[in-house]
Amino acid sequence: MIVREIEARSLVTKTRVPAADYCINPYIGCPHRCVYCYAEFMKRFTGHSEPWGEFVDVKHCAKKINAAVYAGRSVVFSTTTDAYNPLEKQYGVTREALSAFAGSKVRVSVLTKSDLVLRDIDILKKCADAEVGFSMATVDDAFRKKIEPGAPSIAKRVNALRVLREEGIKCHVFVSPIFPEITDYKAIIDMCAPYTSEFHFENLNLRGSFRPRVLDLVARVDRRLLPFYDDIYRLRIGVYWDALEKEIIACCAERGLKCVSYFYHERIRK
């Protein structure tokens, strides 16, 4: 892992992510090494030649965050990295940035795969309407190791979800990405429903340079799935995902769960 420390002009930037007005990415790159990571496109702007997942730039910023500027708006940690990746233990960039919003009127949300977020419960309790989401694509930790080799285990995420609920911090589970015929979204709901009633869903995106890497992994899981994936992503992508979205919405409604779908970002408005 190549780690560099860089100076950033600002940590807060506008975002087109549907659920937030601004985002904070305290790091460039991520050591989780998720095979499906769409954020690999960032290399077009950062100039890194190293493979995605093998470098992390740690951002430092002399300009302090003025939370009053963002009062009444929403800020998410993070969109192109995991703010609680293992390097956060050493550098604490996320904790420092999060602290700026304590006692403010900014709506803060965190999306992570890491139980390290528990370290910052004290700050989250001081943030207005703070929310933490845990990303999960499977309940099978053997499969998790194949798709997210550097990320914390599923058990650690579920335990963190439980602890945050006990501490009174709002949480949700982000079922993402959904691998067709591999991700068992109902199993994820069953595992996490005791600790949250809100679930977000996102399909597997294969529109990036990572597509061959993902399909190679699918082939190693079950080569018989390759024609099915080809059918979904080349011939009838809308048909498959529309049907699955309806199924998920019905499942959540039956169980009294809040369901948010991100299958089609272009249809979602802030």
Image (tube, helix red, strand yellow):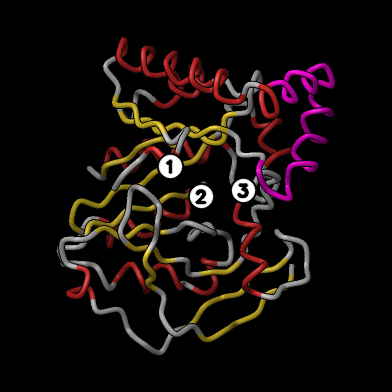
- The CA distance from mark 1 to mark 2 is 28 Å
Examine the image and state in which quarter residue 36 appears. top right
Going from N to C along the chain, the mark reached first, 1 or 2, is 2
Q: Nearer the viewer, residue 79 or 173?
A: 79
Residue at (52, 40) in percent of width and height = 156
Q: Which mark is residue 266?
A: 1
Q: Is residue 73 magenta?
A: no
Q: Is residue 104 above or below residue 252?
A: below
In this rendering, the label closer to the viewer, 1 or 2: 1
Task: Return the residue at label 2.
Answer: 114
Q: Amino acid at mark 3?
A: Ala
Q: Is mark 3 in CB contact (under 8 Å) with mark 1?
A: no
Mark 2: amino acid: Ser
The magenta stretch spans which residues? 207-231
Label 3 – label 1 distance at C-alpha: 29 Å
Q: Earlier in the sequence, mark 2 or mark 3?
A: 2
Q: Residue type at mark 1: give it.
A: Glu
Relative placement, left or right, of 222 versus 190 is: right
Disc 1 crowd rating (10 Å Cα; few below 14, some 14-19, many 20+) is: few
